[in-house]
Image (tube, rainbow, N blue to C red):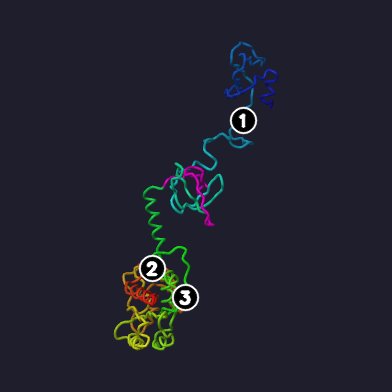
Amino acid sequence: MVSFEQRLGADRLGRLDIVLNDGAQHRQLAFVDHAPHLHLVDPASERPILVGGALALRYVECQVYDATVNDRYGSDVLSGDWRVPKGGRAREVEAEIGLVVEDMETGWCGAVVRVEKAGGMRVVHLEDRGGRSKGFPLGPGFLLDGAPVILTRPTAVARAAAEAAKVAASRTASGSRALEGVRARVASGSRIFVEGKHDAELVEKVWGDDLRIEGVVVEMLDGVDDLAAVVRDFAPGPGRRLGVLVDHLVPGTKETKLVQEARALSRFAPYVRILGHPYVDVWQSVRPERLGFQSWPIIPRGQSWKHGIVAELGWPHESQTDIAHAWKRILATVRTYADLEPTLLASVEELIDFVTTQE
């Protein structure tokens, strides 16, 4: 087949060619914009006829391809909306605190830490993983998860949520105000003793931040069967106070008698505070709602309390490893002091106040 340009030969009209299908004639009509003269073309001779004007037309024979023939050059590059950017159109996103974006021009990537007005314009500050902060004009030019976005000023709802999150972050799990930049103190001479490992882990999770600031160490006892001897060995005194948290401290129990013996050591009495909670085990100090029931199950006497509880929860409970895993799951439900029973909270808070009292 002879190319269109070759068929035109020396009489080719130049500049812009627009080809239209002329149906059964299998011909094409060639238009040339802004030609100096009008040529009427005789289809038989294919010679142009100068008429004069500003538009020339010409018929030439052509071959019509079937629509199913593959196009070796692919799809039309101009198909679709060519005005849409390759990465898609930018959408508006509120510059909420913590939102991680990237500045398209500099490549700076960081989390939004604040939006402020400076120099008559809104500026968003991004903090990278190294803690460095940099300001950028609020508006277009950012990427969020690889897609272009336009950062806008947070709405009142978003600002309120950010403020609430900031307040929550400024509190420890015990509800105390978090002190930024304050290092833990060297351990003081005072101590808090708890009965077992689970007690120690629970106290650490809720009050650990407070205790480190105060320099108070929590130590684990293997029961309280010889509590009086523990007190004598510790030898409490000025600047060396001792607080003890006892499980199941209720009238008429063995634990109550042991505590009375330890409190009877008058020599150390001013520097010792022994408190407890009424629960069979510290597990019960976790609010049962956190585990999905209204109250802790009652386990019959003679049956292992912890094994019975885990069985009631429907978890594996055959081995001691199963019990350890069950406690980890229970402990994981504790987020703050609000997830614990008030009786335990009161005892622990009083012990912390006691051992941190300055002489």
Q: Indicate which disc residue 65 carries.
A: 1
- For disc 1, the neighbor class at 10 Å (few under 14, some 14 to 19, many from 20) is few
Residue nearest the viewer, comparing 304 with 239: 239
User: Residue at point 36% right, 50% down?
Assistant: 157
Residue at the front extreme, as displayed:
359
Residue 201, position in %: x, y? Answer: 44, 74
Residue 311 visible in image: no
Residue nearest the viewer, comparing 300 with 164: 164
Residue at the left extreme, as displayed:
251
Residue nearest the viewer, comparing 207 with 179: 179
Q: Quadrant of the C terminus?
A: bottom left
Q: Earlier in the sequence, mark 2 or mark 1?
A: 1
Q: Are marks 1 and 3 in contact (CB under 8 Å)?
A: no
The amino acid beneath tag 2 is Ser
- For disc 2, the neighbor class at 10 Å (few under 14, some 14 to 19, many from 20) is many
Q: Indicate which disc residue 187 carries.
A: 3
Above or below: residue 46 compared with residue 78: above
Magenta-colored span: 128-153
Image quadrant in which you'd find residue 66: top right
User: For the residue labelled by badge 2, is the local secondary structure a helix, a strand or a loop?
Assistant: loop
Q: Earlier in the sequence, mark 1 or mark 3?
A: 1
User: For the residue labelled by badge 3, is the local secondary structure a helix, a strand or a loop?
Assistant: loop
Q: Indicate which disc residue 162 carries.
A: none
Q: Which residue is mark 2?
A: 174
Image quadrant in which you'd find residue 173: bottom left
